[in-house]
Amino acid sequence: MSLLRIRKPKTRKGKKVLLAREPQLIESARTMLFLDGRKCGGNVKLCMKDLQALKKPLVKVLNRKNDITPFDDPSSLEFLTMKNDAALFTFGSTSKKRPDNIVLGRIFENEVLDMFELGIKRYQAISEFKNEKIGACVKPCLVFNGPKWAQTEELRRLRNLFIDTFQREKVDSIRLQGIEHVLSFTVTDDMNILMRSYRILLKKSGQRTPRIELEEIGPSADFSIRRTKIASEDLYKQSRKQPKQLKVGKKKNISTDALGNTKGRVHLGKQQTGSIQTRRVKALRKTPEEKKENRQRKKVALKAAAAEALASQGNNPFSS
């Protein structure tokens, strides 16, 4: 039985909300839902608070405690994400068996697509770094260090989940001063995830390009991977499928140069320039001398043609 009854909208506002929830050709930036478990405190609360600060304004926070076990029964979690129109979620909880536990996941067609349970082994909040911070709504640069991110399918999906989590609106261009924040993710030999946050400082270098320095501003966390739940290859491929309207087809005789200019080649048939009707200009008219000369040339050409015809008849033995 569905937890959310499907009803037709009775008002214009309700219809507008339902239309906004339908699949769009160009999806907007994804919203993340934050919710607490039965017990939640300490490092879990600090980590979720810092993640909200990095993700703002694309966040929705539920302050009530929820008796949810995502890996055993995700139906309540799917209902809350659908109700709040969120494609990403962060669930924080702590227990004797799994202390300082955070679950990151994403939703596809109102069902859990991928879900990762991370344990917090060490955490430093943003408030513990006494230095200048970045501005709000800054799009971060994501750095994934090392080749281990491509070794297993779980790590590849986790990397893709981090990209979805911190991705914002797509932009065509960005200025150098707009790159202020770096998030670094590293996989260690014992399969721990190290997350670090830096502020980019542009220093004078005596050249046109500035010298770059990094200053750690938090949060700083060491995670251990506990449990994972990833979608099948077919479902994952379906979730990444793009509509046909957005696919750019290859166009013939069109190329782009190194500067980004589009060039096209046009094929035309044989042009009959002699029969083109142009405007008669007095300066282009022939003089009487030129007309007389043309008449004489035509007469000479006609006489030559008649002489050749008579000569050919005289040389033909079968002519009468």
Image (cartoon, rainbow, N blue to C red):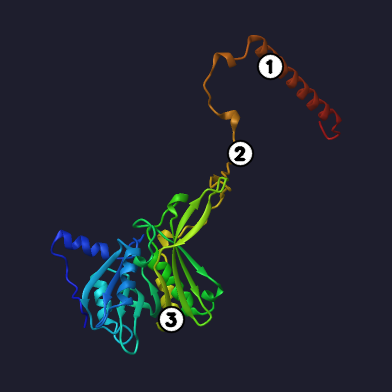
Numbered tag placed on residue 217 in the rendering: none
Q: Please name the amino acid that badge 3 sits on.
A: Ser
Q: Earlier in the sequence, mark 3 or mark 2?
A: 3
- Local packing at callout 1 (Cα closer than 10 Å; few below 14, some 14-19, many 20+) is few
How far is mark 3 from mark 1, CA to CA? 98 Å
Residue placed farthest to the bottom in the image? 97
Q: Secondary structure at mark 3?
A: strand
| Nearer to the camera, 201 or 231 | 201
Q: Which residue is mark 2?
A: 270
Residue 269, given in percent of the width and then of the height, sits at 59, 41
Q: Which residue is mark 1?
A: 294
Q: Nearer the viewer, mark 3 or mark 1?
A: 3
Q: Earlier in the sequence, mark 3 or mark 1?
A: 3
Residue 209, given in percent of the width and then of the height, sits at 55, 48
| Nearer to the camera, 84 or 104 | 104
Q: Please name the amino acid that badge 2 sits on.
A: Lys
Residue 186, given in percent of the width and then of the height, sits at 49, 73
Q: Which residue is mark 3?
A: 224
Q: Earlier in the sequence, mark 2 or mark 1?
A: 2
The reply to whether residue 240 is visible in this rendering is: no
Q: Secondary structure at mark 2?
A: loop
Q: Please name the amino acid that badge 1 sits on.
A: Asn
Q: Nearer the viewer, mark 3 or mark 2?
A: 3
Q: Nearer the viewer, mark 2 or mark 1?
A: 2
Residue placed farthest to the left in the image? 10
Identify whether 293 is placed above or below 65.
above
Which corner quadrant holds the N terminus? Answer: bottom left
